[in-house]
């Protein structure tokens, strides 16, 4: 069931995003755009023959990208029917990486075609020439800092509330199963951290270089003000959605049906986020179209855009630059910050693969229960629980572990392995070491008040072990 | 006023900034007393080191085109000292330009017309 819900969630989150990315980076009509596949749209591209050539490139690239998208959708649909959490996660992870590469490939190919066209047209590049409007330098900002700080403060208050609830310093009543699991604290803390990162990016973006598109300072000022306002609105909306999520997660402390409500909230969060991104990209494109005729100056740094996607310019000291593929910002990978970002990205990819391998080992290694002298030993991979027989108060044999309500505080929660600290039927601090596919389990209660729920590799061995220790 | 920076030029960037600000003041694009962006803001806009902008401002200040103070930042001087003469360095530069123009077949009248246009 967990595996199926995981598949559905991945499908629902990834496929709409991929299709939205497809629609934005492969539009039907690209003529009014500032960049065509990462190459600056210029006057020389507007004569009849060149327009026809560019139209051919756009059409063939879009067709290829569409075919890749259809293939991705079919593959994603097939992935829904896979069995086994680890296999499924590994396949989804591979799918994410491959689909991102797949959707980029036509773009990179089209970028190369555009660069070739540029060379064929003998367009002498004015590479290394940039313009700065002295009147507007450093004076155009759209971000009001309090609009970001207030959501962060509220988010921090909500995070503090969930921490206090988890620590039991705020009594929410006996029916609140999830309090004490630190699940709410973990989620709201993660979202609070996300909010702080968004705030830092928003501040940095607001301080980004103004674009000089015209010799008229007023046009430059209005253009940059509109652009920065759109970006500021996006970040503020993002912060508000983030705050909504923290608030909703905290409110779950008062609900009994945590999992279902949590999925609904996550889906609502994703939908809101997608809407905000769509609005932002549309507004950004509208501004570019509105000012398309006013552009008389442009900085030709096409050569510094690898595949039209990655900006690598050692002569540029800026950290963030406007991205050419969609809307928003990207880092200059030639700078220190860019190199650190690239390293973090590479590490994230390696870490995600390592997690999958580790999960495979967890799922593939059976639990071993044994009696070693006067101790019960529960062993799997590097984890071991030791229960001294002398401390056992009672031992019960249960027939269906799945009938119990179990909320993980920490540890592993997989289809075939539950290991760690759990809240079982509202009893906090229970230690679990079992395979839920083996429904039979042994409930050991110690004199210290700790409950252990354990099982062996299969039902027969679990029963045999129970007979040995009862 | 728009400043054009050529990264690949033989002229150092600080000198390009200095030259264009001087031309801006001369052409009236920068009025006397007009505020210039801070060193940090201009460096950020240009994607260059703050030291480069600082060097340009320092040069402009030494030459008497701008004034700087901690409170108001950099401003165009309202009373730029008028020496009424061309510096030796500029005379040499002008001689080079005139020589190149003559070798390129530019007539004296064309050159004078151009000077008149630039002089205003």
Image (cartoon, helix red, strand yellow):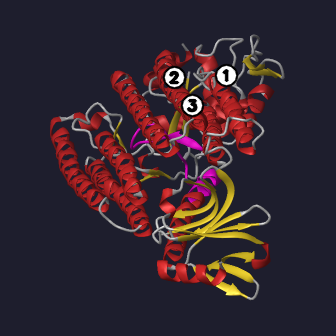
Residue under numbered circle 3: A239
Answer yes or no: is residue B91 visible.
no
Q: A61 left or right of A424?
A: left
- Give the residue at x 65% y 32%: A155
Residue highlighted by disc 2: A229
Between A380 and A199, the one nearer to me in the picture: A380
Which label number is shown at residue A146?
A: 1
Which residue: 83% across, 19% down? B71
* Residue occupying image coordinates x 79% and y 77%: A390
Tell me the quarter of the image containing the C terminus of chain A: bottom right
Does residue A445 lie above or below B22 as drawn? below
- Residue A85: name its quadrant: bottom left
The answer to whether residue A329 is magenta is yes
The magenta span reads: A319-342
Q: Are marks 3 and 1 in contact (CB under 8 Å)?
A: no
- In the image, A182 versus A100, the foreground residue is A182
The quadrant in which residue A432 appears is: bottom right
Secondary structure of residue under mark 3: helix
Question: In which quadrant will I find the N terminus of chain A?
Answer: bottom left
In this view, the residue farthest toward the bottom is: A373
Q: Are marks 1 and 2 on the same chain?
A: yes
x%, y% of residue A354? 54, 70
Q: Chain of mark 3?
A: A
Q: Nearer the viewer, mark 3 or mark 1?
A: 3
Precedes in sequence: disc 1 or disc 2: 1
Q: Is residue A51 left or right of residue A112?
A: left
Dot in front, 1 or 2 = 1
Q: Nearer the viewer, residue A118 or A313?
A: A313
Mark 3, mark 2: which one is toward the viewer? 3
| Distance from the alpha carbon under mark 3 to that under mark 2 | 15 Å
Chain containing the residue with disc 1: A
């Amino acid at each position: 069931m967990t595996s199926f819900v995981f598949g559905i969630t991945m499908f629902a989150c990834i496929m709409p995003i991929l299709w939205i990315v497809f629609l934005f980076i492969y539009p039907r009509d690209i003529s009014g755009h500032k960049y065509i596949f990462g190459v600056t749209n210029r006057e020389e591209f507007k004569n009849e023959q060149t327009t026809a050539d560019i139209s051919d490139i756009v059409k063939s690239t879009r067709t290829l990208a569409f075919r890749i998208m259809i293939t991705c959708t079919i593959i994603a649909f097939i992935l829904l029917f896979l069995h086994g959490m680890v296999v499924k996660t590994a396949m989804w992870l591979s799918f994410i990486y491959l689909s991102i590469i797949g959707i980029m490939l036509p773009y990179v190919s089209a970028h190369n075609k555009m660069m070739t066209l540029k060379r064929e047209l003998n367009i002498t590049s004015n590479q290394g020439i940039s313009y700065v409007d002295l009147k507007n330098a450093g004076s155009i900002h759209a971000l009001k800092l309090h609009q970001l700080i207030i959501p962060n403060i509220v988010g921090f208050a909500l995070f503090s509330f969930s921490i206090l609830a988890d620590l039991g310093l705020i009594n929410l009543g006996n029916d609140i199963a999830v309090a004490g699991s630190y699940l709410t604290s973990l989620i709201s803390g993660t979202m609070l951290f996300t909010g702080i990162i968004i705030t830092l990016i928003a501040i940095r973006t607001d301080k980004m270089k103004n674009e000089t598109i015209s010799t008229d300072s007023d046009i430059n000022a209005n253009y940059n003000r509109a652009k920065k306002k759109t970006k500021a609105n996006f970040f503020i909306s993002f912060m508000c959605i983030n705050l909504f999520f923290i608030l909703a997660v905290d409110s779950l402390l008062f609900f009994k049906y945590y999992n279902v409500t949590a999925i609904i909230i996550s889906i609502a969060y994703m939908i809101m986020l997608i809407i905000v991104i769509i609005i932002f990209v549309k507004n950004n494109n509208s501004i570019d179209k509105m000012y398309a005729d006013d552009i008389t100056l442009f900085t030709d740094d096409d050569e510094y855009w690898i595949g039209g996607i990655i900006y690598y310019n050692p002569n540029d000291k800026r950290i963030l630059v406007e991205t050419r593929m969609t809307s928003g910002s990207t880092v200059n990978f030639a700078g220190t910050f860019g190199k650190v970002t690239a390293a973090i990205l590479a590490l994230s990819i390696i870490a995600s693969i390592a997690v999958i391998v580790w999960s495979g080992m967890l799922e593939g290694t059976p639990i071993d229960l044994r009696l070693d002298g006067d101790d019960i030993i529960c062993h799997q991979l590097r984890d071991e629980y030791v229960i001294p027989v002398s401390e056992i108060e009672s031992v019960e044999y249960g027939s269906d572990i799945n009938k119990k309500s179990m909320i993980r505080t920490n540890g592993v929660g997989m289809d075939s392995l539950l290991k760690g600290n759990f809240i079982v039927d509202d009893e906090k601090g229970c230690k679990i070491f079992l395979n839920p596919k083996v429904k039979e389990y042994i409930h050991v209660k110690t004199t210290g008040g700790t409950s252990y729920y354990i099982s062996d590799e299969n039902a027969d061995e679990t029963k045999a072990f129970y007979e040995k220790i009862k | 006023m728009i400043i054009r920076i050529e990264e690949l030029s033989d002229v150092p960037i600080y000198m390009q900034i200095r030259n264009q600000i001087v031309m801006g003041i001369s052409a009236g694009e920068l009025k006397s007393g007009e505020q210039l962006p801070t060193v940090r803001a201009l460096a950020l806009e240009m994607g260059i080191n703050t030291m480069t902008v600082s060097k340009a401002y320092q040069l402009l200040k030494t030459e008497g085109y701008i004034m700087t103070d901690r409170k108001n930042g950099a401003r165009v001087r309202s009373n730029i000292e008028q020496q009424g003469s061309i510096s030796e360095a500029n005379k040499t530069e002008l001689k080079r330009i005139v020589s190149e123009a003559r070798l390129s077949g530019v007539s004296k009248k064309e050159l004078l017309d151009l000077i008149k246009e630039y002089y205003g």
